[in-house]
Every structure is written in structure tokens, then in C-alpha cells.
């Protein structure tokens, strides 16, 4: 029997590279996949790093997603410095069935694969217009994050929700502050309230003057009050923007630093969908992962998880589990079959926007590589500033040239 680890662990957060999860995850997954974990506020919970357990607990209704139950922050961050209240009505990511299912059902129809595929021509247009702007006045260099990876999901989610483009800067700044690890509890709360105030005004405007968008559609169904409508809109705005923007940016960085893989993709366009799945599997986007609270005593791989204890389900560690993805799971290989990864979670809370995110990524890479056959990093890889100060990982800037 291994004596590793010698006591409860802290959540590993130090990365040794832009693309890899903290190195400690590999040893934990191999020797102690269900590990006792100390939370910064003194709570003792669990850190789960193996693929089968992460996946099965994400789908286990006895492990609650109610945010007031799993309120112990797994690492020092602004949300952890004040008690977390129950989710506002409509903010369904922090709820369990039946409330969760009721809200989710109301919007799920807008996010099916078929529905999302209809957005293809518009997303292609958006990508092309960003590329045109990058090339304006004969420019040969750009910041791929500010000029491409961020505007594509921002424009897409704005159009979907019916948010006027002129308002985008208002919520983008607030979302940045909300996810910034340096924000204190008050700044973080104020950022949240600023987004909430914005979406509440938006709902009022849509009620008075409906358009052809998701919020107006929800208003027409007449099943949610204004507070619920605002919370649903806020969730979609926050969940749909930063995640996808960082995936597009970090994914482009990955391709540009793995020339053999980039060459494969350039040679064979049909590898595009595979490349997207592999990037989703390979890149650790979230600092912690899924958070749940046990609602009854449960045996997980022989460890006794007690009711009330928090579990951190590391999506990044699960996505690199050799038992699921093979002995070379730490290698970025876009010919691999990466399906089954948990980058979008699993179970009832599995990402509602997964088809949209996939489509945005696919279009973004295809359009980018076609436009710039000679695309390259404009700085050394270790000069790319990483988002070590943010909840969602990625690059702050990605200087490229062509
Ligand atoms: C690459 C981009 C994205 C990644 C990696 C991602 C990842 C995730 C993950 C891991 C969850 C599950 C959280 C949990 O179980 O606690 C989730 C939930 C969610 N995501 Fe995404 N997401 C992405 C893009 C999007 C987009 C584009 C949207 C839509 C506009 C979106 C909307 C949501 C919503 C509404 C939930 C909550 C679902 C529920 O609780 O039922 N996401 N996402």
C-alpha cells in the first residue's frame, strides 16, 4: 500500500506549461485518485482525479450541484471569501433537479446540434470579418486573443441573446473582473451585480420591444418572471463567452507550438472535428473543475465520503487519464479519438453550449488557417502572457504574424 500522499492535499494550481494541468495530478491519479483535500477555509473534502470516478460522480444525483452546499472554495479566490447564497432563481448551474431541469428545459431547445448548425453561415461571416479587420491597412501582425478569439464568441452570444453590440464592452469588463483572482469579495460581487443590472435592463427592454432572439423567445413563452429571465441570461452570457474565447485562443497557441500537428490539420481538412475534440480534451481550462457536495455517505473507490463533504472533480486530470485515453494521454495528438472527454462535464449539468462551442472552434480554426498559410507566433512561446491570475485559463495575448 502506497503512503502517498502523506496527508490531505491542497488543490494543485501551479502549472509548468501553458498546456498542461499541474504536474501533481498525475501522481495523485495513479496512487490516490480519491484524495483527502484541505480547503483554504479549513473544510476537509475530496479531490477526485481518475476518469471513471469524475465521470460517474458528475452524473450522480446524490452529489449536489447546489452552490450553497458546495460553497467551500477549493483554492484562494474571491468567491471563497464570503458565504455563498443559494442560486438566484433561474441561475440553474447551481441547482439540482427538479428546479434545475425546469429551467434547463426551457432553453435546451435552442442549443441542440441541429439548431446550432443553422448558425454556421453567420459564424463564418463573423470569423471572416474579424480576419478582415486583422489584415486592415496591410497589417502583418495581430493579437489573436483581442482580435479573433474574444470577438467571435462575444459577437455570437450577443446575437443569440439579442444583446446590442454597443453594450458588449459593458459586460466584457465586468466578466473579466468577476473571474479575476485578484478581485476581493466586494469587487467580485460588484462585478456580478453589474452584469445582473445590465441583463435586467436588457430584459425590460425586450419586454417593451421584443426582437428575434433567445430572451424575447423566453419572454413570449411567459413561464419565467423578470428576475428569472435575468439570471438565465446572465448564466448564458457568462458561461458562453470566456470559456469559448479562451479555448479558441489557447487552442491556436497549442497548434502553433505543435507544428507537426498543425501540418496534419493543414493537409487534411477533415481532421477539423477531431482537432476540436482533442483540444477540448487536452487543454485544462478550469482551475479547479466540477464542484459537488455529497448528500449522503458514499463509498468512492474504498474511501468514505461523508454527507456534507465537498468534492472537487478535476476535469483536467480525468481528461489525461491513461486508463481512458491511453499511455500517451499527455500528448496532443489530433488523430486520436478523444470523444468521451469531460471538458464539458457530464450528466445533468453537462455544458448546454457544447455544440455551439464546438462549432465556433471549428469555424475559427478553419477560417484562420485558410486565411494565413504562414501563420506563426510573433514572440517566443514563453513570452506569451498566461492567465495565471484568472479562474479560466488561457492566454491574455497571443501575438501572431503571417
Ligand atoms: C469551450 C467552451 C466551453 C467549455 C469548456 C464549457 C464547459 C462547461 C462545463 C465543464 C460545464 C459543467 C459545469 C458543472 O458540471 O458544474 C458547463 C456548463 C454550462 N455551460 Fe459551458 N462550456 C463552454 C461553452 C459554453 C457556451 C458557448 C455556452 C452557451 C451559451 C455554455 C453554457 C453553459 C451552461 C448554461 C452551463 C450550465 C448547464 C447546467 O447547469 O445544466 N457553455 N460548461
Image (tube, helix red, strand yellow):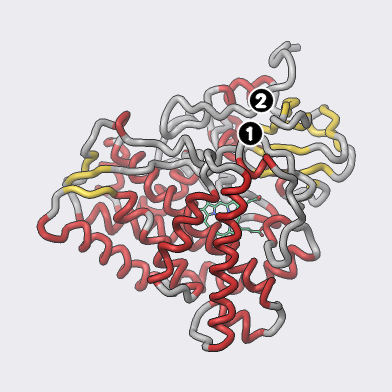
Across and down, in percent, residue 41 comes to 73, 32
Residue at point 10%, 57% (across, down): 138
> Mark 1 falls on what kind of element?
loop
- Which quarter shows the N terminus? top right
Mark 1 / mark 2, whichever is N-terminal: 2
Q: Quadrant of ligand 1?
A: bottom right
Q: Name the residue at the front extreme.
A: 186
User: In the rendered picture of this protein, how many numbered marks are placed on residues?
Assistant: 2
Across and down, in percent, residue 144 comes to 29, 49
The reply to whether the residue tagged 2 has its Cβ within 8 angstroms of ligand 1 is: no
Across and down, in percent, residue 278 comes to 45, 44
Residue at point 45%, 56% (across, down): 173
Residue at point 62%, 34% (across, down): 76
Q: Is residue 175 left or right of residue 274?
A: right
- Give the residue at mark 1: 75
Q: In this view, does 344 lie to the left or right of 15?
A: right
> Mark 2 falls on what kind of element?
loop
**Residue placed most toward the observer, 318 or 237:** 237
Q: Is residue 108 left or right of residue 61?
A: left
Relative vertical location of residue 368 with respect to residue 55 in this rendering, above or below: below
Across and down, in percent, residue 390 comes to 50, 41
**Residue placed most toward the observer, 126 or 112:** 126
Q: Are marks 1 and 2 in contact (CB under 8 Å)?
A: yes
- Labelled disc at residue 10: 2
Q: Is residue 53 visible?
A: no
Residue at point 67%, 35% (across, down): 74
Q: State the CA–CA distance, disc 1 to disc 2.
A: 8 Å
Relative vertical location of residue 171 with respect to residue 320 in this rendering, above or below: below
Category of crowding for the residue at label 2, using alpha-carbon neighbours closer than 10 angstroms: few (below 14), some (14–19), many (at least 20): some
Amino acid at each position: 500500500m502506497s503512503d502517498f500522499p502523506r496527508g490531505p492535499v491542497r488543490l494543485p494550481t501551479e502549472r509548468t506549461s501553458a498546456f498542461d494541468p499541474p504536474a501533481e495530478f498525475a501522481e495523485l491519479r495513479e496512487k490516490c485518485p480519491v484524495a483527502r483535500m484541505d480547503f483554504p477555509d479549513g473544510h476537509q473534502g475530496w479531490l477526485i482525479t481518475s476518469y471513471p470516478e469524475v465521470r460517474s460522480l458528475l452524473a450522480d444525483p446524490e452529489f449536489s450541484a447546489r452552490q450553497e452546499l458546495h460553497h467551500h472554495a477549493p483554492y484562494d479566490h474571491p468567491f471563497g471569501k464570503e458565504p455563498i447564497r443559494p442560486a438566484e432563481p433561474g441561475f440553474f448551474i447551481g441547482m439540482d433537479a427538479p428546479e434545475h431541469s425546469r429551467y434547463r428545459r426551457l432553453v435546451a431547445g435552442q442549443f441542440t446540434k441541429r439548431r446550432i448548425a443553422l448558425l454556421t453561415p453567420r459564424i463564418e461571416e463573423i470569423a471572416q470579418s474579424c480576419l478582415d479587420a486583422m489584415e486592415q491597412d496591410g497589417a502583418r501582425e495581430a493579437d489573436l486573443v483581442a482580435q479573433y478569439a474574444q470577438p467571435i464568441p462575444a459577437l455570437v452570444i450577443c446575437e443569440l441573446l439579442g444583446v446590442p453590440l454597443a453594450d458588449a464592452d459593458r459586460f466584457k469588463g465586468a466578466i473579466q473582473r468577476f473571474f479575476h483572482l485578484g478581485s476581493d469579495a466586494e469587487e467580485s460581487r460588484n462585478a456580478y451585480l453589474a452584469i445582473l443590472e445590465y441583463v435586467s435592463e436588457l430584459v425590460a427592454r425586450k419586454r417593451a420591444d421584443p426582437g428575434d432572439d433567445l430572451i424575447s423567445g423566453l419572454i413570449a413563452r411567459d413561464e419565467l418572471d423578470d428576475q428569472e429571465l435575468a439570471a438565465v441570461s446572465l448564466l448564458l452570457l457568462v458561461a458562453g463567452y470566456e470559456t469559448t474565447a479562451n479555448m479558441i485562443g489557447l487552442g491556436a497557441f497549442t497548434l502553433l507550438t505543435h507544428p507537426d500537428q498543425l501540418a496534419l490539420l493543414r493537409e487534411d481538412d477533415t481532421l477539423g472535428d477531431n482537432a476540436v475534440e482533442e483540444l477540448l480534451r487536452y487543454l485544462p481550462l478550469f482551475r479547479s473543475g466540477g464542484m459537488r457536495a455529497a448528500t449522503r455517505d458514499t463509498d468512492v473507490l474504498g474511501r468514505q465520503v461523508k454527507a456534507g463533504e465537498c468534492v472537487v472533480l478535476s476535469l483536467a486530470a480525468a481528461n489525461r487519464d491513461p486508463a481512458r485515453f491511453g499511455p500517451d494521454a499527455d500528448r496532443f495528438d489530433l488523430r486520436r479519438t478523444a470523444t468521451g472527454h469531460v471538458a464539458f462535464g457530464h450528466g445533468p449539468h453537462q455544458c448546454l453550449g457544447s455544440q455551439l462551442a464546438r462549432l465556433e472552434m471549428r469555424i475559427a480554426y478553419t477560417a484562420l488557417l485558410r486565411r494565413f498559410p504562414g501563420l506563426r507566433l510573433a514572440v517566443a512561446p514563453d513570452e506569451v502572457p498566461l492567465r495565471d491570475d484568472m479562474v479560466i485559463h488561457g492566454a491574455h495575448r497571443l501575438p501572431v504574424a503571417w
